Amino acid sequence: MMMLVLAWKNVWRNKRRSLIIVAATAIGLTAGLFYAGFVTAMYAAIIDSGINREFGNIQIHTSAYKSDRLIHQFLPDLPVVLHTIQADSNVRSFATHSIIEGMASSATTASGVAIVAVNPEQEQQVTAIARSLVEGVYLDKTNSIIVGKKLSEKLKLKLRSRVVLSFAGMDGNIIYGAFRVAGIFKTDGSNFDGATVFIRQDDLKPLLGTADVPIHEIVVRTHSEEILDRTKVKLQNAMPGDVVVETWRELAPELKLTGDSVDIVNTVMLGIILFALLFGLINTLLMSVLDRVRDFGVLLAVGMYRRRLFLMIILESLLLSFTGGFAGVVLGWGITEFFGRFGLDLSAFSAGLSSFGIPSLVYPYINPSTYGTLAIMMVITSIIAALYPAIKAVRLRPVEAIRTIA
Amino acid sequence: MPVIEVRNLNKIYNTTSVPVQALKDISLSIEEKEFTAIVGPSGSGKTTLLNLVGGLDSVTDGKVLLDGRDITTMREGQLIDFRLHHIGFVFQAYNLIPVLTALENVEFVLFLQQVGKHERNQRAMELLERVGLEELADRRPADLSGGQQQRVAVARALASHPAFVLADEPTANLDSHTAESLLDLMEDLNKNSGITFVFSTHDPRVIQRARRVITLEDGHITGDRVQIPQRAST
């Protein structure tokens, strides 16, 4: 305890010098933690956005559809598949999709699109498209269509505009269908918005001339993310042979990578900040050691072991960096909490951000594990910073050190 | 058995291209409860001798036996431990730890000896009382006069119950009155508590208060006399 007291008093022996490094540490960590909170929230938002927009938690297709995406590669034994899903208590909701690659034509131009025929009631339980409407209403009427904002701009579509969809039917013949724009949606994925349209499954039936639409995809939402793998395995085991059950991590490995890389990105960023602070800390400790050569000589003379002197300088480094670190954590936490509550408005950059699936309003938050990582990194930084000054101190010869002029 | 015994001690400094022999074949012994001054002009080897006797510097040749143990053969860890438990140091420039209070400065030696908090606090306070500074226990060195700081340094030197105290020019930075007062204190500790003091000094006030005076010149002992100590007339 006395060693700790002495180390603490030594830290404040030169108040200005210590305050400078404490302030630098505090500012650096405030920025680092806020950045970590921002990145964590942004990456989580990207993942949530992807899940809510198109992937859901789990998707079910045939293996053939996954590679070719052809109209006749629909799910076999649909009643069995649906019954299996409905029977699973881990499933919160699900929606069936009939997805056909085709062309959307307006009065002025045309564009390739994925035509997604949905059951509107089911769909609203599973994806966020209905909540992403910026104009109009969801699929409320016969032959209504909703299109992405980007596509509407490309095809110069407005509400009530006429759109003709064309696609290859089951027999390979081209089918045309006329629809009226009921709504325009805007998600965080501009690529999705530029190449996807939604229609009602009931409107697809007459075009295909079938009693039932071919279902190519079932999107499933589970009660939580934690039960995802368990649910996937359970569903997969109960499915007919050619049916593939995949989680969003398998469907969108780039999203998985995003989630997995949050901790790495944050650790690297905090590491860069601490690396820069390391030199300031070394400088402060070295100056402090050089100022106290005579004191160290006296301590060694009266019987202080060199290892204790070494420990004292390590302690001083830890106290110095943790004082700044504590201030930085409090400030960083406070600022992150503030923006976490009120949101960080990035709408000025929304056009660019949406192409990466990043929302324009981000609510930063810091994972508790970040504090643990930071503490470990700070201990390591403090010890590394103290090594050279401490080695310099313990190598002093008391007889020479005592004679040093303070 | 003498508390300090030096046999054929030589010290050569090789810090420059020309080796300098600071001590030449020094032999002496100091008994318990002595009040001895090592005197001589600057550069005569007083401080070097004290440093070697205190185990702060390594000998070139010869032996230093303290309480019968040869410290020249000790490893560094043993030597630090020996200094902690057997030798008290008083330096010319006081050399207190500036961030610690007077009490904490005295306590620190006891802390190094791993004495418990309560006991070391009690003992440090007793020592400050002995040097007349109990009222100033909470003051830092910067808030004490030179004489008061040196008294704290004496208390610190006594904290470990040393076999002897080595004082290197203890009065050099003090005015006459303060120096006399400090000498009174050390003389009192010597007479009444039996503490052995060895000074290096060229201060006549110290020399006349010593009971034994060893004179060094050019690294040789040129005189070793026992005298009746005298108090300064001022």
Image (cartoon, coloured by chain):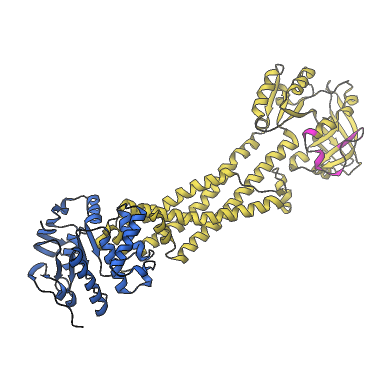
* Image quadrant in which you'd find residue A178: top right
Q: Is residue A268 above or below residue B164?
A: above
Q: Is residue A269 above or below residue A94?
A: below
Residue interval drawn in magenta: A125-145
The chain coloured yellow carries which letter?
Answer: A
**Split into 4 quadrants, where in the image is the C terminus of chain A?**
bottom left
The chain coloured blue carries which letter?
Answer: B
Q: Residue at x 13, y 53 (%)?
A: B68
Q: Position of residue B208 (x, y in %)?
A: 14, 76
Pick whichever, A320 or B229, lies toward us. B229
Q: Position of residue A289 (x, y in %)?
A: 37, 60
Q: Is residue B177 above or below residue A85?
A: below
Q: Position of residue A247 (x, y in %)?
A: 67, 29
Residue A86: tell me if it is visible.
yes
Q: Residue at x 71, y 36 (%)?
A: A51
Q: Magenta stretch: residue A139 in it? A: yes
Left or right placement of residue A386 versus residue B115 in this view: right
